[in-house]
Image (cartoon, helix red, strand yellow):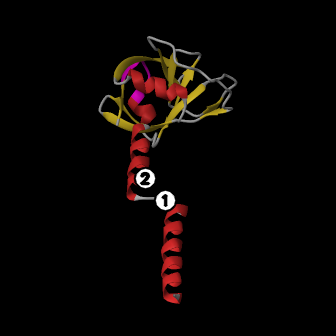
């Protein structure tokens, strides 16, 4: 009788330990898929940059527009911008500081890619950020430039 009770106890604690920590290979694969869905490839000339999109309505709406190639316009020696063909949901706030590689929405239809860091008083909606922005300023150059955006 003691043996039967011991076997039931061991089986039940084994069951409960699986329920407490339900991380499985399938969960890991699903998390990887979500991470990959938030990766953006940005191509400027011969240079390719990888960016991570935020988890917000603006990034989700932008993903639905991809892939696209846009003629981005130079502004202020620190950013390239383009007016999108349709509005995106916006939730603007002042970031205080813009960082090299930030991808933001100004207003509801202006996509902005920053290639220099600086302080700002303007408000933007965060979309994402280039993972490694080294060489971004050189790739974008001084004038207007074609930039391609697509999901990785």
Measure the alpha-carbon separation of dots 1 and 2.
8 Å
Residue sitting nearer the eye, 6 or 44 = 6
Residue 45 shows in this picture: yes
The magenta stretch is: 140-147
x%, y% of residue 10? 50, 78
Q: Is mark 1 on a helix, strand or loop?
A: loop
- 10 Å neighbourhood of mark 1: few (<14), some, or many (≥20)? few
- 10 Å neighbourhood of mark 2: few (<14), some, or many (≥20)? few
Q: Which residue is under mark 1?
A: 22
Query: Is the residue 143 above or below the residue 33 in the image?
Result: above
Question: With 71 as the anchor, is 55 left or right in this view?
Answer: right
Q: Which residue is under mark 2?
A: 27
Verify CB contact (< 8 Å) between mark 1 and mark 2: yes
From this viewpoint, which residue is outermost toward the front? 1
Q: Which residue is drawn at 65% across and 23% down?
A: 123
Which-is-in-front pick, marks 1 and 2?
A: 1
Residue 78 shows in this picture: no
x%, y% of residue 104? 54, 26
Query: Is the residue 7 above or below the residue 29 in the image?
Result: below
Q: Residue at x 52, y 84 (%)?
A: 6
């Amino acid at each position: 009788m003691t043996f039967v009770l011991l076997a039931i106890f061991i089986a039940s604690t084994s069951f409960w330990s699986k329920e407490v920590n339900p991380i499985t290979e399938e969960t890991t694969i699903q998390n990887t898929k979500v991470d990959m869905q938030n990766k953006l490839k940005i191509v400027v000339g011969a240079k390719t940059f990888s960016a991570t999109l935020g988890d917000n309505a603006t990034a989700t709406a932008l993903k639905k527009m991809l892939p696209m190639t846009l003629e981005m316009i130079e502004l202020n020696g620190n950013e390239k911008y383009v007016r999108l063909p349709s509005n995106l949901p916006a939730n603007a706030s002042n970031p205080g500081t813009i960082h090299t590689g930030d991808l933001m929405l100004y207003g509801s239809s202006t996509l902005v890619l920053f290639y220099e860091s600086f302080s700002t008083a303007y408000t933007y909606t965060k979309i994402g950020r280039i993972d490694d922005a080294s060489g971004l300023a050189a790739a974008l150059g001084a004038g207007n430039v074609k930039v391609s955006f697509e999901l990785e």
